[in-house]
Amino acid sequence: MASETRKLLVTGATGFLGRHVLQALHASQPDTQALALCRRRADWNRQAWATPLDNVDVVEGGVTGAEGWTGDRRLKDCAGIVHLAAVVRHSRHEPADLYETNIEGTLRMVRLAAQLRCPMVFVSTSGTVGCFESPEDKADEDAPYVERTVGSWPYYDSKIQAERKARALAAQLGVSLTIVRPPILLGPGDHRLRSTGHVLKYLRGAYPFLIEGGMSFVDVRDAAPAILRALGHAAQRPVYHLDGTDCGVVEFFELCRQVCGVRPPARVLPFGVAHRLAATAERMARLAHRKSPLPDPVVIEMGRHYWGLTSLHAERELGYKTRPPRQTLADTIDWLRRNALTPTNS
Ligand SMILES: NC(=O)c1ccc[n+]([C@@H]2O[C@H](COP(=O)([O-])OP(=O)(O)OC[C@H]3O[C@@H](n4cnc5c(N)ncnc54)[C@H](OP(=O)(O)O)[C@@H]3O)[C@@H](O)[C@H]2O)c1
């Protein structure tokens, strides 16, 4: 490609959001070259969805560990960093790699942005500010961190620390940094079966019960183009929220039932009972070196909260629009049925 080609570095390229960001870039700016950071080139080569993306070049490396790749000549004149790489795991068990990746990895990308003199978008999560006891509460971009609520959940704790430290480092190094906070991402193409894993478990009938609480989600196909556009506003806008559909857990699975006909569990347990069951199952599973059949206790604790989010600027400045939630659920379920369920259990 010619040396004046616009280039963007995308971390987390092999993930669910990375896939959609790269696809959105290919669709909207096919002349922009994406430098996709991948820990192992072989992993990238296995991504069949990436084959049509002829504007993507792989940079082999991680956001933690050796940083030799940051001297790659292809990064010269990079127009921006879209930092998506993270460990997303909802558990208190052995969180060291999660903290290292989510905090130190983000700070390394801020230092790289300073070195390359380019703006950076860091995708955090709505849960750093939008997690409440009541469905009435909503967080806008100016809301304070909710560390008292989420501080014992390593993933959210790491994202709050990453946001704070990245903001301070960016100010010190003169980097234009904008933080984008989406809620749970759903939609087709979650090839790692992580972000949409709870929908897959529901389709498999693997949930023995539900609990009362909240849920907030957005379509990854709506979030990805907005994240790309946020790069153009990194100098002016410190934070964008990408609000989606806020609903109850029971209501969410009822919506899924209306879309696909699979009945969700009828039993809705009080939080205390569900939490005790999950904690006991987790202890026993660890002793037996097995995976617990119940959700991690952290997931139960999260599930009883509400994740209300308001976007003040995304629609006007990023052209952010969300499609109807039923369409997101229908496309998520359809994709999971075709790609993750065998004919016997679909
Ligand atoms: N999915 C959601 O519901 C959701 C909601 C809100 C915010 N977010 C945020 O959106 C971002 C992307 O999420 P996702 O759903 O796409 O996650 P994902 O599917 O689990 O993908 C995670 C990505 O991060 C990469 N990664 C992990 N550790 C790394 C390291 N040390 N160095 C380089 N790359 C590393 C993974 O690469 P490997 O292939 O090498 O493992 C993978 O590409 C994350 O920052 C997440 O916090 C996600």
Image: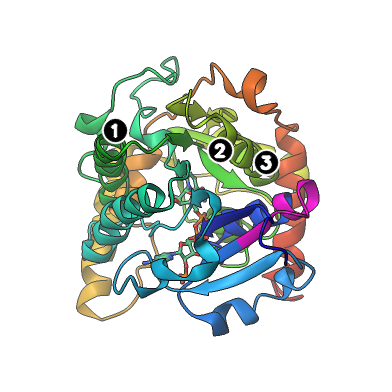
Label 1 Cα crowd, 10 Å radius (few <14 / some 14-19 / many 20+): few
Magenta range: 25-34
Distance from the alpha carbon under mark 1 to that under mark 3: 26 Å
Q: Is residue 31 magenta?
A: yes
In which image quadrant can residue 164 be found?
Answer: top left
Label 3 Cα crowd, 10 Å radius (few <14 / some 14-19 / many 20+): many
300 or 268, which lies in front?
A: 300
Read off the residue under disc 1: 171
Q: Note whether residue 154 is visible.
A: yes
Which mark is in front, 2 or 3? Answer: 2
Q: Note whether residue 261 is visible.
A: no
Read off the residue under disc 3: 225
Tell me residue 205's x, y (percent).
58, 60
304 or 97, which lies in front?
A: 97
What's under tag 3, amino acid-wise? Pro
Q: Residue 24, relative to residue 133: is it above or below?
A: below
Q: Give the number of callouts.
A: 3
On the rendered structure, is 44 left or right of 300? Answer: right
Q: Is residue 333 magenta?
A: no
Residue drawn at x 64%, y 81% as measured from the top left: 46
Which mark is in front, 1 or 3? Answer: 1
Read off the residue under disc 2: 231
Q: Quadrant of the C terminus?
A: bottom right
Distance from the alpha carbon under mark 2 to that under mark 1: 17 Å
